[in-house]
């Protein structure tokens, strides 16, 4: 058995809004699935990490799944400056979950949530 090409899929209420949000983080669209000419799933990539976003509506209709508000995982994005990155995301539709703060010996981190409530950790190495 050989597994390969892992990715995370997020189920969202507002597919186009979510796509635009993640593109502002630097993700690039690599794939779109359409049903009856309507996008229902996008795949985006950032620095080798693949993220899928699919509409909750299509997930229910096509696959019989009933996704809810799952906060059992998060997306982590490294940056050069946590504070300015979080402010950029807030300015572009994110909501604050945890203000930037120092932790461990050399990291600074904070959390926001995307327009559908999925948590995103923004982390950087502190400069000494």
Image (tube, helix red, strand yellow):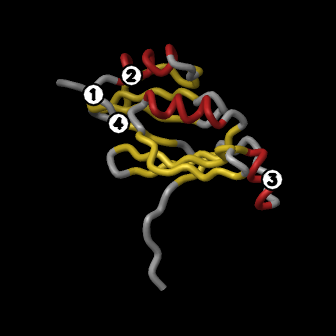
Q: In this view, does 80 lie to the left or right of 114?
A: left
Q: Which residue is label 3 attached to?
A: 60
Task: Measure the alpha-carbon separation of dots 1 and 3.
Answer: 39 Å
Task: Measure the alpha-carbon separation of dots 4 and 2.
Answer: 10 Å
Q: Which residue is label 4 attached to?
A: 78
Answer with mark 1 or mark 2, whichever residue precedes in sequence. Answer: 1
Q: Which residue is label 1 attached to?
A: 80
Q: Where is residue 47 in the image (x, y as percent from the top left)?
A: 32, 46
Answer with mark 4 or mark 2, whichever residue precedes in sequence. Answer: 4
Q: Which of marks 2 and 3 is in front?
A: 3
Answer with mark 2 or mark 3, whichever residue precedes in sequence. Answer: 3
In the depicted view, which residue is nearer to us: 10 or 57? Answer: 57
In the depicted view, which residue is nearer to us: 126 or 104? Answer: 126
Task: Measure the alpha-carbon separation of dots 1 and 2.
Answer: 8 Å
Q: Residues within 10 Å of mark 2 (few under 14, many from 20)?
A: many
Task: Measure the alpha-carbon separation of dots 4 and 3.
Answer: 33 Å
Q: Nearer the viewer, mark 4 or mark 3?
A: 3
Q: Position of residue 108 (x, y in %)?
A: 35, 27
Answer with mark 1 or mark 3, whichever residue precedes in sequence. Answer: 3
In the image, residue 101 above or below residue 120: above
Residue under the point 35% across and 36% down: 78
Residue 72 visible? The answer is: no
Determine contact: label 2, label 3, CB under 8 Å: no
Determine contact: label 4, label 2, CB under 8 Å: no
SS for dot 3: helix
Q: Where is residue 26 in the image (x, y as percent from the top left)?
A: 38, 33
Residue under the point 51% across and 35% down: 120
């Amino acid at each position: 058995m050989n597994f390969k090409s892992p990715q995370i899929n997020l189920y969202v209420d507002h597919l186009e809004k979510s796509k635009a949000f993640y593109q502002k983080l630097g993700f690039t669209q690599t794939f779109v699935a359409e049903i009856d000419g309507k996008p229902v799933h996008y795949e985006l990539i950032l620095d080798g990490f693949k993220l899928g976003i699919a509409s909750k509506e299509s997930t229910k209709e096509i696959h019989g799944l009933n996704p809810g508000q799952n906060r059992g995982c998060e997306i982590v994005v490294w940056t050069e400056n946590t504070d300015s990155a979080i402010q950029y995301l807030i300015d572009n539709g994110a909501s604050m979950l945890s203000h930037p703060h120092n932790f461990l010996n050399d990291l600074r981190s904070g959390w926001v949530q995307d327009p559908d409530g999925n948590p995103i950790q923004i982390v950087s190495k502190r400069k000494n």
